[in-house]
Image: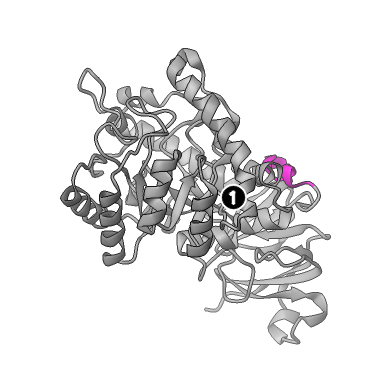
Amino acid sequence: MTERPVVLDHARLIDGTGAAPVSDAVLVVEGTRIRWCGPTALVPDDPDLRSAARIDLGGRTVCPGFIDTHVHFALPGPAGDPALGVAEHVTYRTLKVLERLRTTLHNGVTTARDLMGLDAGFRRAVAERRIAGPRLLVAVTMLSQTAGHADFRLPGGVDGLAAAVAFPGSPSGIVDTVDDIRTRVRALVAAGADCVKLATSGGVTSPHDGPEWLGLRPELVRAAVEEAEAYGGLRVAVHAIGEPGIAAAVRAGVHSVEHGYALTDELRAEMAERGQFLVPTLLETMAEPDPARVGPHIHAKAVHWHRVAQEAFARSVQAGVPVAMGTDAGLTAPHGRNLKELGLMVRFGGMTPLQAIRAATADAARVCGVDDLTGTLAAGMAADLVVCGVDPLTDLDGLADPSHIHAVVKEGRLAVDRVGVLAPAGLPDLT
């Protein structure tokens, strides 16, 4: 039986492409897809639409469902200590992940790329609507060489990353030879990974290295890119903070540079020419870790590199480097406040609100390889919608407040409706 369409009237439409808003628009949802959207004056004369359920949005702005290309649902953010995972049952850690997924979806993110932690079982459970959450893409684990950013092996013999963050059966993240990394990329493909996550520089929170170190040799990065391309054309995302790690990633032909704090003008020009994306994760730079918890060394790294990140981002935007939204939510950034990144891209990068929204919709979809499904509001695309309680073009920061996310629809199903605006439409619930 064909599902009846639902007509959303008197909407202000921001379609995700960067085009100016349509001030008086109609959006038609049928099943999981958008059947039609555009100016009210151009609505087709269709008998199905004349008899369809109609909802007056009263001029509220509708955006595509937002996409966070860099999250870690297995990490607790400022709400907890990831080291506690060592002493927790896997079932308990799983239940905490479910709450983070639900919170993220309800606050406007309908697609998320988890770049270390979750396995493919979470993706399947979300896709089958067994649990509520954004559409998931998973990297499963992160790869680096010994003493690199993926090496959390402690002096007592415990692998902190494997014990506290990874789920059973996830491949190890330590690779030290070209053969190692080729085999490990294949293992990730077999484990159901949607993309490959590498760490070509050290990290702020990792115990053995510094962001300015080269965390994965160039020949290993090139081998990973080759294997990922050969095994289904998987995209390669790279944690790269310092210049050596960024250079190794960019010149190996990766798809996205995550963080990219120490980008030089030369590397920016190369990224712009190749169309390689920068995922700046500015939200992660807004909180300093507690020195009592992480120690003075890691605290000092955070203070320095976060300042570098904030000061460098505008130069990347000006150089024409493509940008996609990613928050690193779960590290120091809280889950569910992902859309705060939009205002930070305007504040630190000089982007316009429309550019920031595009970075979190159409361009983020391109990074994830789902731009044929979501990221824009157009006929045939998934009905992933966010109904806003503020005008994002004048109060973009307002989207970070959950009370201003009036409703979220994912694939034509109602995920949350805080003000009852879509309740009369009869849209099915998500789960």
| Vertical order, 262 against 65 (above or below) | above
Give the image location of residue 218, x and y in percent: 30, 49
Q: Which residues make up the magenta segment?
A: 395-403
* Residue 293 lies in the magenta-colored region: no
Along the line of sight, which residue is nearer the eye, 421 or 227?
227
| Up/down of 272 relative to 307, above or below | below
**Residue 354's spot in the image, x, y percent?**
71, 58
Q: Is residue 76 left or right of residue 184?
A: right
Mark 1 highlights which residue?
A: 316
Residue at the spot 61% in from the left edge and 55% down from the top edge: 319
Q: Tell me which secondary structure the magenta stretch mostly adopts.
A: helix
Q: Position of residue 88 (x, y in %)?
A: 33, 25
Would residue 96 appear left or right of 217 to someone viewing this image?
right
At 38% across and 55% down in the image, what residue appears? 251
Tell me: 290 left or right of 43: left
Q: Position of residue 153 (x, y in %)?
A: 25, 27
